[in-house]
Image: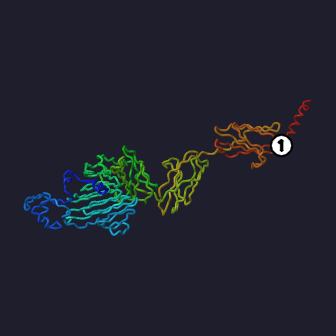
């Protein structure tokens, strides 16, 4: 079997119920409802390309008496016999980069307001989409990364029937076919491995080289491949792989729970975290502008309701985890539409979440102090923001900034609290000011003010000299601290004679010459952080004078 014959044998027809009645149709045709006074000649004169072909209509419908027609009954007329005229599609909206190629191979950017005739091709880039409206008010949304050609855009029988055939080479389409349920319309989506033909339903089609996926959101769809057909009801999906019958329909995943998503977002990039969902292996998020819609959350299992809230697509992001991230958007009001996909790649019901983005002017990035400060007046420091004319800084004892200690403005990128802080935990944040408008605050920063150890009291211990050695007993240092001691000939400690550590406050330095010394001591923490030095002067006496006095003691006793 040739490839062409194989592809033709794989044709998939998606038909709105009743499926059995549609499957008996001999081919593409229009069904005209007879009215009182209608005759075959009159109907043929109004609608046939060749009015004299009315006998063919009689034979096609097996009408015994052409003069006795039953009002209300259907007259079937093949499309090829009908008068037809072009019915260009109207481009309702374009976002991002969508290219238009005309039948003469000229190419340009697609624009809202364009009228597209048969033969026009569209290609959408990432985060780009186009919305088209057809003569029967069918709406097709070309999703990001898709390529589609308009094969046929025609009206038949003076507008009595609209025939639309779209060739989707790759990517996805969201389709709302014949929303007014006008009789006689037909819309086909032809993919490399399938044909989706519908009347009056809402569905999605995704085309890959060897797989076509279909998800029915409203109505009933018949899916046929290699001579086998399944009925895909609303809320179900199926797929047709090359050379295989359609998969049995499965229930689409429910809409994700978006109730915990924020109504207001003040930081970029945008990040949305969703609850895990049984059976879901990937998630798709799309963002569109929001006009007159009250902020809030909710499931939009009804495709029409979701469509009403969801405007032209601005950003799209897929993720293998229930976390979606979007790099950048201008401040404004938006709608997030999100759905999950199952192991077959079938995308589930939509949920929509309205939110407001207010991230500008951007919040500065705090840089200092760290988590622990030792100064009673720590320096608060942050990055400069381009375009900012000033900054608002807040300092509080609590994370909710209810117990405010500082709330001020500055044009600098640093600020020191005006008074000394008491030991304990603090929280601070900073916001940019641009053109008189304050932006969102940075994420709150927490630090603990832990004062340095104080200077030890050296005056409480009397030095003792014996045989050229100095002994000194200081109070035992607090737990976790030790003494660092220096004995020098000068107050600046540049001529050090002796130095050492003491964990219990005991000091012994030798040998010492008779002279004036400066004893400096400070408390040091386990990590090496040291407090200020305390210094006292010590006079080391002459050893000769003391030894001479010792020699004279026996004489004095005589």
Report if residue 223 is visible in the image: no
Closer to us: 90 or 312: 90
The residue shown at (30%, 67%) is 115
Q: Which residue is located at x 13 percent, y 57 percent?
A: 73
| Secondary element at tag 1 | loop
Q: Residue at x 25, y 58 (%)?
A: 179
| Nearer-the-camera pick, 329 or 141 | 141
Q: Position of residue 519 (x, y in %)?
A: 75, 44
Left or right: 53 as drawn, with respect to 6 = left
The quarter of the picture where residue 183 lies is bottom left
Q: Residue furthest top?
A: 558
- Residue lying at the far front in this picture: please name it: 1
Q: Quadrant of the C terminus?
A: top right
- The percent coordinates of residue 356 (x first, y second) are 40, 56
Query: Between residues 96 and 272, which one lies in front from this camera angle?
Result: 96
The quadrant in which the N terminus is found is: bottom left
Q: Is residue 286 left or right of residue 404?
A: left
Q: Quadrant of residue 96?
A: bottom left
Circle 1 residue: 514
Question: Where residue 319 sits in the image (x, y, percent)?
Answer: 41, 51
């Amino acid at each position: 079997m040739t490839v062409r014959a194989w592809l033709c044998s794989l044709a998939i027809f998606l038909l709105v119920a009743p499926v059995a009645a549609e499957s008996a149709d001999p081919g593409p045709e229009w069904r005209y409802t007879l009215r009182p006074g209608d005759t075959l000649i009159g109907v043929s004169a109004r609608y046939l390309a060749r009015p004299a072909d009315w006998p063919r209509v009689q034979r096609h419908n097996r009408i015994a008496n052409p003069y006795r027609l039953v009002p209300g009954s259907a007259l079937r007329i093949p499309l090829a016999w009908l008068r037809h005229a072009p019915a260009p599609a109207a481009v309702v909206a374009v976002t991002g980069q969508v290219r238009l190629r005309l039948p003469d191979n000229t190419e340009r950017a697609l624009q809202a307001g364009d009228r597209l005739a048969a033969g026009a091709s569209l290609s959408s880039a990432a985060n780009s989409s186009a919305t088209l409206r057809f003569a029967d008010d069918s709406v097709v949304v070309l999703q990001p990364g898709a390529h589609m050609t308009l094969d046929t855009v025609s009206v038949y029988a003076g507008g009595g029937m609209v025939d639309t055939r779209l060739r989707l080479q790759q990517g996805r389409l969201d389709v709302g076919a014949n929303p007014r349920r006008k009789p006689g319309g037909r819309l086909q989506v032809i993919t490399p491995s399938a044909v989706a033909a519908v009347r009056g339903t809402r569905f999605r089609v995704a085309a890959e080289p060897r797989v076509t996926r279909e998800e029915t959101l409203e109505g009933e769809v018949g899916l046929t491949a290699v001579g086998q057909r399944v009925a895909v009801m609303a809320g179900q999906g199926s797929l047709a792989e090359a050379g295989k019958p359609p998969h049995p329909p499965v229930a689409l995943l429910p809409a994700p729970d978006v109730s915990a998503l924020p109504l207001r977002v003040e930081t970029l990039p945008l990040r949305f975290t969703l609850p895990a969902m049984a059976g879901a292996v990937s998630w798709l998020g799309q963002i569109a502008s929001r006009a007159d819609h009250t902020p809030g959350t909710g499931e939009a299992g009804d495709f029409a309701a979701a469509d009403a809230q969801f405007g032209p697509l601005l950003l799209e992001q897929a993720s293998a985890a229930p976390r979606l991230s979007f790099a950048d958007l201008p401040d404004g009001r938006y709608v997030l539409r999100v759905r999950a996909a199952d192991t077959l790649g079938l995308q589930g019901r939509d949920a929509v979440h309205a939110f407001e983005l207010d991230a500008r002017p951007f919040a500065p990035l705090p840089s200092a102090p760290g988590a622990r400060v030792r100064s009673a007046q720590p320096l608060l420091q942050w990055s400069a923001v381009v375009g900012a004319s000033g900054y608002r800084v807040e300092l509080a004892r609590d994370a909710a900034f209810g117990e405010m200690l500082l709330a001020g403005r500055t044009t600098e990128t640093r600020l020191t609290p005006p008074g000394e802080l008491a030991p304990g935990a603090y929280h601070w944040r900073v916001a940019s000011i641009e053109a008189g408008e304050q932006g969102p605050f940075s994420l709150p920063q927490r630090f603990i003010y832990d004062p340095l150890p104080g200077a030890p009291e050296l005056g409480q211990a009397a030095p003792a000299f014996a045989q050229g050695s100095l002994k000194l007993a200081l109070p035992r240092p607090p737990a976790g601290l030790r003494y660092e001691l220096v004995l020098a000939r000068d107050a600046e400690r540049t001529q050090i004679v002796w130095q050492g550590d003491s964990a219990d406050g005991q000091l012994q330095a030798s040998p010492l010459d008779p002279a004036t010394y400066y004893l400096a001591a400070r408390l040091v923490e386990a990590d090496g952080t040291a407090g200020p030095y305390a210094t006292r002067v010590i006079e080391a006496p002459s050893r000769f004078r003391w030894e001479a006095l010792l020699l004279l003691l026996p004489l004095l006793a005589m």
